[in-house]
Image (tube, rainbow, N blue to C red):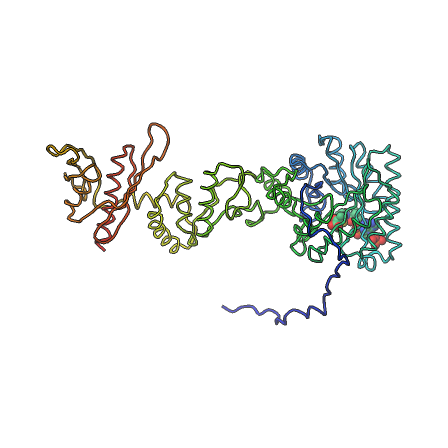
Amino acid sequence: MILKSHSIKTGMPEAAMKYQPYPQVALSDRTWPSKAITKAPVWCSVDLRDGNQALVDPMGHDRKARMFHLLVDMGFKEIEIGFPSASQTDFDFARWCVEEGNVPADVSLQVLVQCRPELITRTFEALQGAHRPIVHFYNSTSELQRRVVFGKDVAGIKQIATDAAKMITDMAARAGGGYRFEYSPESFTGTELEVALEICNAVIEVVKPTPDNKLIINLPSTVEMATPNVYADQIEWMCRNLDNRENLIISLHPHNDRGTGIAATELGLMAGADRVEGTLFGNGERTGNVDVVTLALNMFTQGVDPKLDCSDIERIKEVYEYSNQMVIPERHPYVGELVYTAFSGSHQDAINKGMKAIKQANKPLWEVPYLPIDPRDVGRSYEAIIRINSQSGKGGIAYILQEDYGINLPRKLQVEFREDIQRITDEEGKELPSKRIHARFLERYVEQPGARIKFVDHHTYPVGDHKSLRVVAAEITDNGETRRIEGKGTGPIDGFINALSIYLGIELSVADYSEHSLQHGSNAAAIAYVEVEYPGGTLFGVGINTNIVAASLEAIVSAANRVLETMAK
Ligand SMILES: CC(=O)SCCNC(=O)CCNC(=O)[C@H](O)C(C)(C)COP(=O)(O)OP(=O)(O)OC[C@H]1O[C@@H](n2cnc3c(N)ncnc32)[C@H](O)[C@@H]1OP(=O)(O)O
Ligand SMILES: CC(C)C(=O)C(=O)O
């Protein structure tokens, strides 16, 4: 095959010539590193706006409405429903929310608008009749955008913000009040801190927030440009320096360009922020907004009530996939198909032991190795915790047989059976589903198709005057031919193995024996495991029968067949 030639690879350009390091914040007395997150922030979902504006095909009414209902059910009290002045779809959706959306009284609708008079006017039309809606206005303040997008100096950019603040507060007053306000110095992370502070303080001065109507100052990492500690420094610095801090709600709106949106948000909360804007599973512009489900569940697993209901994560996933028309990868935190599954042997062994210990301890505290959260807390089950492939060990196989079929293998049998499963997984190079592991177990140890000996029946009777010695007379088939065999022993197992040893001409004895019931109720079957010693070593046999003695004798026959097979090789 001739490969098409691509352009000659010349390597990446010299980094230092093309990019510059992000400046550090001068905050040597920062306090956030020794803080912890001890309570949930105010959550605001921006799925229907920032998430929506990043979609290939933006949501129509149905997709928006379904997402909106989910957000309400999850407990969001602030929901940015769109940018009503930007499109008729968003305008109509705002009207639907106000008129037909059954918005609970404690939920505020939030809408985004640029600092442009015609857009502000249209925004107020969209919100007419809404209960305490939040008008979120923004303009970009970054050095780069001031220069290349707006062609204005700091004073000019500040003017855009304060003119909008004035217009919005005037319109709200004329409408009789009842509005809340949010201002974002968009591209905050590209803005010099002193400039962001000056512009925010000018907006605060116009809005004049009060304890009853606090102003939300949203400090977005519109583009994530630095390590999370830098964002935390910026937030702590702003919290310290903003005017009228007690009447402000400091909000974070992180994006995830460097893949550290979650960390940045957590550090930002430690640095003093009160509120977080984000989206379900992190949909949003470019690499997305911060993922509020992961944030909430991170808090939950630290023992903090996140005040966001993620108990039905499958429904959240389903709505996310329907409304956004995107799929969630298998490894996504808390929700991905594989995140509660271990394939590797040592992980499976530790989980298996952890699950047993937690059952025995019977305490609410969750302590299972490799599982930071109990899957049932988010509506997932234990079914998929352990799956078997060539990386798996005996603990995982034992867990599957125990959890799915109630079969509790003795430790030495786990070792023996694991070798068999390992051979299959190595040969096939694929996962071996639970059903096939069970079928293989039955085939090898219980059903034994093609095996030489089958157990049919037995009875016992005393040996002369001996009180403890009995004769065991059994019926078996040998390659389909009926045979009657006899032996002596202190009980049926002892006598039967003696009979089989005489019949086969091989010295057999019982090295280990255990049994347990398989189901509850009057028809409970018993499963017996017998380790039989023969001149070449030991091998296990298994029998399943409603009669415990019959199960034990079947187990001996099973082991004997395996001895015959091994000796024939
Ligand atoms: C970081 C974020 O996510 S911000 C949110 C971004 N979301 C969106 O843009 C989605 C919805 N937007 C839209 O549908 C459209 O952009 C509209 C309807 C809002 C505006 O459309 P148009 O006016 O036709 O076009 P466009 O967006 O290109 O307008 C850019 C103009 O607005 C100005 N502008 C941009 N943002 C702002 C702002 N926040 N405040 C004031 N002016 C602004 C620009 O400087 C530019 O001005 P110019 O025409 O004098 O050069
Ligand atoms: C409008 C603002 C808050 C925004 O979406 C961003 O900066 O990412």
Q: Quadrant of the C terminus?
A: bottom left
Q: Measured from the top left, where is residue 208 in percent x and y?
A: 87, 41
Q: Is residue 446 visible?
A: no
Q: Measured from the top left, where is residue 551 in percent x and y?
A: 27, 37
Quarter location, residue 89: top right
Q: Measured from the top left, where is residue 12 in percent x and y?
A: 65, 69
Q: Image check: 207 left or right of 356?
A: right
Q: How many marks?
A: 0
Of residue 182 and residue 470, the one placed in the foreground of this image is 470
Quarter location, residue 92: top right
Q: Image check: 326 left or right of 403?
A: right
Q: Measured from the top left, where is residue 256 in percent x and y?
A: 67, 53
Q: Image check: 362 left or right of 557?
A: right
Of residue 150 and residue 477, the one placed in the foreground of this image is 477
Which residue is at 37% across, 41% downward? 408
Of residue 277 and residue 328, the one placed in the foreground of this image is 277
Which residue is at 17% across, 45% downward? 501
Q: Residue furthest toward the left?
A: 464
Q: Is residue 555 visible?
A: yes
Which residue is at 63% across, 37% downward? 309
